Image (tube, grey):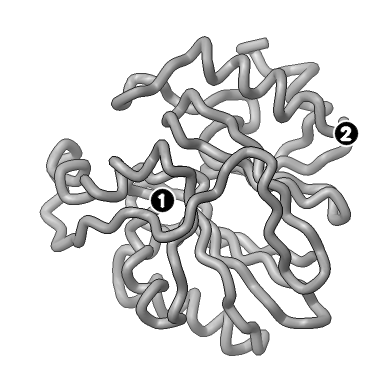
Amino acid sequence: MKVSRFVFNMFGINTYVMWDPDSREAAIVDPGMIDDDERKALDSFIERNELKVTQLINTHMHLDHIFGNAYVKEKYGLEIKAHPDDNFLGQSLKSQAMQFHLPLQLTDMGLDVELNDGDTIYLGKEPVNILDVPGHSPGSIALYCPESNFVITGDALFKGSIGRTDLPKGNQAQLLDSIRRKLFTLPDDTVVLPGHGPETTIRFEKAHNPYF
């Protein structure tokens, strides 16, 4: 599995494109594009690499991670896949933007397909395992690719930090428990691709993250 990162919007979120190099099947994870330049950057990459986008996945549905959902859904003919416990966030995108005083024209849009703990999706023949990691939001998930040795953690785990838990239905104790049970039990050399900031590894976070 190959993966590329784009940094989009005023929140600096990491949007990932991961794809199987043989079949060219690709997933867009957390499309955060906010304007035409960002949409063009993503589309140009997909066209240049001759990718067939088959999946639209949200690690969670806070506004910065779903700004581009409607665009990607329409352009590539996809269904929005996310955990059902975050559906209320997708359906309240406009009110989320108002809370941050963002004068944007947005469309409330919930999920189409549920992803739950233990589910597996495929890009080509390679599995992507769904791990529940609630706490930052109630429906936060991580995407673990065991054959390629990386995990996309959304805003659950960052390099040297964890996700904020002061937004609606956040819970720090739950988040810490999620990380210990679902992420710190992965192989130590697993590469962590977070929702913001640089990559890290499970080994580094177990040894150096100040929250543990």
- Disc 1 marks which residue? 65
Instruction: From the top left corner, tell me how far across and down residue 110 is, in percent.
Output: 32, 54
Distance from label 1 to label 2 (Cα)?
27 Å
Instruction: From the top left corner, tell me how far across and down residue 53 is, in percent.
Output: 58, 77
Instruction: From the top left corner, tell me how far across and down residue 170 is, in percent.
Output: 39, 22
Q: Going 39% across and 40% down the picture, which residue do you hit?
A: 86
Taking depth in this image into account, of 178 and 34 the one nearest to the observer is 178
Q: Determine whether the residue tagged by mark 2 lies in a helix, strand or loop.
A: loop
Asked whether, in this view, residue 191 is left or right of residue 13, the answer is right
Give the quarter of the image for residue 71. Answer: bottom left
What is the quadrant of the C terminus in the image? top right
Taking depth in this image into account, of 86 and 166 the one nearest to the observer is 86
Instruction: From the top left corner, tell me how far across and down residue 25 is, in percent.
Output: 68, 77
Q: Going 46% across and 49% down the picture, which residue do you hit?
A: 13
Return the disc, 1 or 2, that comes first in the chain's sequence: 1
Q: Which mark is residue 187?
A: 2
Q: Determine whether the residue tagged by mark 1 lies in a helix, strand or loop.
A: helix
Image vertical order of residue 33 relative to residue 138, above or below: below
Q: Going 65% across and 23% down the picture, which residue do you hit?
A: 179
Asked whether, in this view, residue 208 is left or right of residue 160, the answer is right
Q: Amino acid at mark 2?
A: Pro
- The crowding category of the residue bearing disc 1, from other C-alpha atoms within 10 Å (few below 14, some 14 to 19, many at least 20), is many
Asked whether, in this view, residue 199 is left or right of residue 44, the answer is right
Taking depth in this image into account, of 129 and 202 the one nearest to the observer is 129
Give the quarter of the image for residue 189. Answer: top right
Image vertical order of residue 174 relative to residue 89, above or below: above
